[in-house]
Every structure is written in structure tokens, then in C-alpha cells.
Image (tube, rainbow, N blue to C red):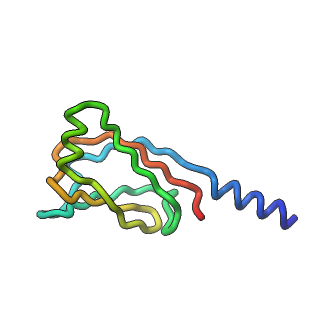
Amino acid sequence: ADKIATNASNITKLNSNLANITLNASGWTGSSAPYLYKISNSKITASNMLDLIINANTQTLVDALSSYRISGYSQSAGSVTIFAWGEKPSIDLLATLVVRGGL
């Protein structure tokens, strides 16, 4: 029984949940860098691994992301806040949030 419980726990740790999201330009807060954007998701814990993949599939988006300098985050149960260290993002960005099962 202990091996079954351990295996189930290990499988849970490997599971990933994907959420397609939009980072709305109006959702960024702050009057100077770093600008903050809070993403809520019930699968986020205080310690699981997260990946944010922003869909930059045009030169315009690549240039915009370069000027926004989005990097780093602060994570807590139920949400993650990301930072923009350059210009305040002024266009909506499509992204995929990958929430991993945890450690």
C-alpha cells in the first residue's frame, strides 16, 4: 500500500495543467517599473513549478516584449504576479501558463 501511495504522489508531481490566458494591457499595475500583473489560477501552490510562455509569433510582438522586459515573478497559493521591468505593456499578450504538479 505504501508503494502505491508513493507512486500516486510521484505521478501527481509530474502532472502539468495548461491554461491559455490573455495578459490584458489594462491589467498591468504601477506607475513605474517594475509593473505588476497578477494571474490567478486555483492549481497554483506556493511552491510548484510554473512556466509562462508568451506567444511572440510576429516581429511586432517580439519588439514589444523586448521593450517590456517581462521577467521574474512572486508566487503564492492561487496566484502568481509577474514583473515588467521596462515599458508598461500596452498591448494584450496571448500566453500559456503551465502549472506543474509540484515538488
Among the 4 quarters of the image, the one containing residue 56:
top left
Is residue 21 something one can see in this rendering?
Answer: no
Tell me the quadrant of the picture where the C terminus can be found.
Answer: bottom right
Q: Note whether residue 35 is visible.
A: yes
Residue shown at 41% from the left, 61% from the top = 79
In the displayed structure image, the side of residue 56 where residue 43 appears, left or right: right
- Furthest residue toward top: 58
Residue at position x 77%, y 63% in the image? 6
Does residue 27 lie above or below 22 as drawn? below
In the depicted view, which residue is nearer to us: 36 or 41? 36
**Residue at 26% from the left image edge and 31% from the top image edge:** 58
Residue 11, image x, y percentages: 70, 54
Q: Position of residue 74 (x, y in %)?
A: 37, 67
State the quadrant of the N terminus.
Answer: bottom right
Q: Quadrant of residue 28?
A: bottom left
Residue 52 is left or right of residue 32, and the answer is right
Q: Nearer the viewer, residue 42 or 69?
A: 69
Residue 29 x/y as whole percent: 20, 60
At x 52%, y 57%, the residue is: 43
Residue 66 or 29: which is nearer the viewer? Answer: 66
Tag count:
0
Where does the image place residue 57, in percent across and percent down from the top left?
31, 32
Residue sitting farthest toward the right: 1
Picture layout, residue 13 above or below residue 24: below
